[in-house]
Amino acid sequence: MRLPWTAALLFASVLIAHSAQAAGPCDDFVRKLPNLKQSLCEAAQLQATPARSVRGQTLWMRDVRPEVAQQRVLVLGAIHGDELSSTSVALHWIRMAEETNAPWSQAIHWRFVPALNPDGLLSSPPSRVNANGVDLNRNFPTPFWERDAKVYWEKRTRKDPRRWPGPKPLSEPESRFLHEEMQRFKPHLIVSIHAPYGVLDFDGPSVPPSKLGRLYLDQVGIFPGSLGNYGGVHKGVPVVTIELPNAMRTPLDAEMRQMWLDLLRWMSERVPPNGSTGLARTP
């Protein structure tokens, strides 16, 4: 039986969308992101997770894991979709995680989520918020979220739509995925890549890194519902927030490598191997 042309068109569009998802994100990423070649993206070997964004796009992940791992580190890009350079840097760092010969890098299980907000990242123009208009970095379940997040948004941001925390904590599929991934993976450290303020921020226990490459520590405080507040302050997992200098351009390749090496060196000194984390204590 022949389908009506409207049904056939819908069926074809579903097949095309499914095919694009199955082929991986690199065509979209290379077309959209700065300083990203097809070969580097494909070499990252991103794996599809079961999670989907508001618009049904796959959330991609990559593990780089030695045979014996003493530390678990979660690296995130594009919590804010208009910070394109953050995803590019995360993809460059996947290659470095595989190649780095520093002795202190050999026992780290890296988990990369290079684009937590694909709807915002791939929209035109790219958007800080997700497809529901929620700032994912204000949507985590910090204590007293229902009171503090609303007050902060209304009073401090004057209801800035780019910083809307959402109707309730973990209201978004992207933030729920990350929250669940933190519970499953139980990282000893979270590295969240942002732009464009050109500084380092830090939340949680341990002594923060004084610098990574040319980025120097400048702690800006905590916000209701932010990942730094939730992970670093509430759960006791150190959160290094990297603010790249430009949302549309990555640092030079040599600078990205220096940031990576500085991160490894700081971890070797300040992040205890096989140490307990707040998330590890959470049932």
Image (tube, rainbow, N blue to C red):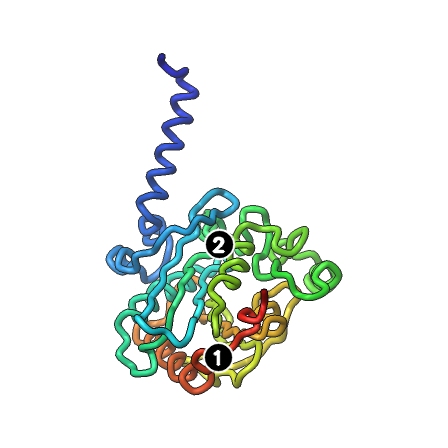
Residue in the picture at 46% in, 85% down: 270
- At 51% from the left and 83% from the top, the residue drawn is 208
Closest to the observer, 99 or 123: 99
Amino acid, disc 2? Asn
As measured in the structure, the alpha-carbon distance from the residue carrying label 1 to the one carrying label 2 is 30 Å
Disc number for residue 275? 1
In the rendered view, tell whether residue 160 sits above or below residue 52.
below
The residue identified by callout 2 is 117
Q: For numbered disc 1, what is the local secondary structure? A: loop
Residue drawn where x is 69% and y is 56% of the image: 159
In-image side of 165 versus 185 (left or right): right
> Which quadrant: the N terminus?
top left
Where residue 20 sits, quadrant-wise, is top left
Near-viewer residue (280 or 20): 280
Q: Residue at x 47, y 43 (%)?
A: 56
Between 60 and 243, the residue placed more toward the observer is 60
Number of the front mark, 1 or 2: 1
